[in-house]
Image (spheres, rainbow, N blue to C red):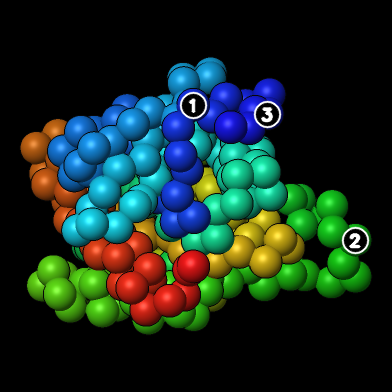
């Protein structure tokens, strides 16, 4: 077993891991979807579990909110604990008129207003994109579950309460909506040779008077969770992860 300042491993960690932002959502997934689940981390309330779904070992770990938190946990999961494929499951605010609340978005790319990429010393702008095989498997998983996903680019924002409104500009560039973690996940995975994907449920829309009720949010997130679990199973069975 291994330890870092943020993860104190007390059980096996699979090489494929689902990453909800809310640690309690990780606990919910372990309880409701995984068989024989065991908790592998409780440090800082970042709950992590490993169990079986359709006889496949899958881990789930709550990363918290924002780029710094995702950057820390994805780095450690990849480099210290050997995770090869990471699938974020979270919510987003919609920009595109074609999007509606409850839609499931497969984030093909993630633009950002963050300076996270500056650490890599690149003389230009880095395009943070998902792993193609994970995208393919997510599309297949959605077909299996009877879900019609929207595939496109999102914005990963450093701010939730922003002093300026840039949404119109991002919307003009075809950005589907906004969330707070995906770009950091995609960059970290690219830098250290792992696979990454974000599946996002539209929980509200910045240009429409729509948002999920508590009951609708639960149902919609469950659809996303099941699509992510099916994606993990397809990925493991097709040999993308050893």
Between the residue at mark 1 and the residue at mark 2, the CA separation in whole angstroms equals 36 Å
**Quadrant placement of the N terminus:** top right
Between the residue at mark 2 and the residue at mark 3, the CA separation in whole angstroms equals 26 Å
Q: Secondary structure at mark 2?
A: loop
Relative to residue 40, is residue 103 drawn left or right? left
Q: Secondary structure at mark 3?
A: loop
Q: Are marks 1 and 2 in contact (CB under 8 Å)?
A: no
Relative to residue 5, is residue 92 drawn left or right? left
Residue pointed to by mark 3: 4
| Residue in front for this viewpoint, 83 or 12 | 12
Q: Secondary structure at mark 1?
A: loop
The label nearer to you, 1 versus 3, is: 1
User: Where does the image place residue 49, in percent across and percent down from the top left?
Assistant: 37, 35
User: Where does the image place residue 201, in percent across and percent down from the top left?
Assistant: 29, 55
Residue 238 lies in quadrant: bottom left
Residue 121 disc label: 2
Residue 10 disc label: 1
At a point 53% along the width and 18% down the height, the residue shown is: 44
At a point 90% along the width and 70% down the height, the residue shown is: 123
User: Where does the image place residue 108, in percent across and percent down from the top left?
Assistant: 47, 73
At a point 84% along the width and 52% down the height, the residue shown is: 119
The label nearer to you, 2 versus 3, is: 3
Mark closest to the chain's N terminus, 1 or 2 = 1
Question: Which residue occupies the extreme front position in the image?
Answer: 1
């Amino acid at each position: 077993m291994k330890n870092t300042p943020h993860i104190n491993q007390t059980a096996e960690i699979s090489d494929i891991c689902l990453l909800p932002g809310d640690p309690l959502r990780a606990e919910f997934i372990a309880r409701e979807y995984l068989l024989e689940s065991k908790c592998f981390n409780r440090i800082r309330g970042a709950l992590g579990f490993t169990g079986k779904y359709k006889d496949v070992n899958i881990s789930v770990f709550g990363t918290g909110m924002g780029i710094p938190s995702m950057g820390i946990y994805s780095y450690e999961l990849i480099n210290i604990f050997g995770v090869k494929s990471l699938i974020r499951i979270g919510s987003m605010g919609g920009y595109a008129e074609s999007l509606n609340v409850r839609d499931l978005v497969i984030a093909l790319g993630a633009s950002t207003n963050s300076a996270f990429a500056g650490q890599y010393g690149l003389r230009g702008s880095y395009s943070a994109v998902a792993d193609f095989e994970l995208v393919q498997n997510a599309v297949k998983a959605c077909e299996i579950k009877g879900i019609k996903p929207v595939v496109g680019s999102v914005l990963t924002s450093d701010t939730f309460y922003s002093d300026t409104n840039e949404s119109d500009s991002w919307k003009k560039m075809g950005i589907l909506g906004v969330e707070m973690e995906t770009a950091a996940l995609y960059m970290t995975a690219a830098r250290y040779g792992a696979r990454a994907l974000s599946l996002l449920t539209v929980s509200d829309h910045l240009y429409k008077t729509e948002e999920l009720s508590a009951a609708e949010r639960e149902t919609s997130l469950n659809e996303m969770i099941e699509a992510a679990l099916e994606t993990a199973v397809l990925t493991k069975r097709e040999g993308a992860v050893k």
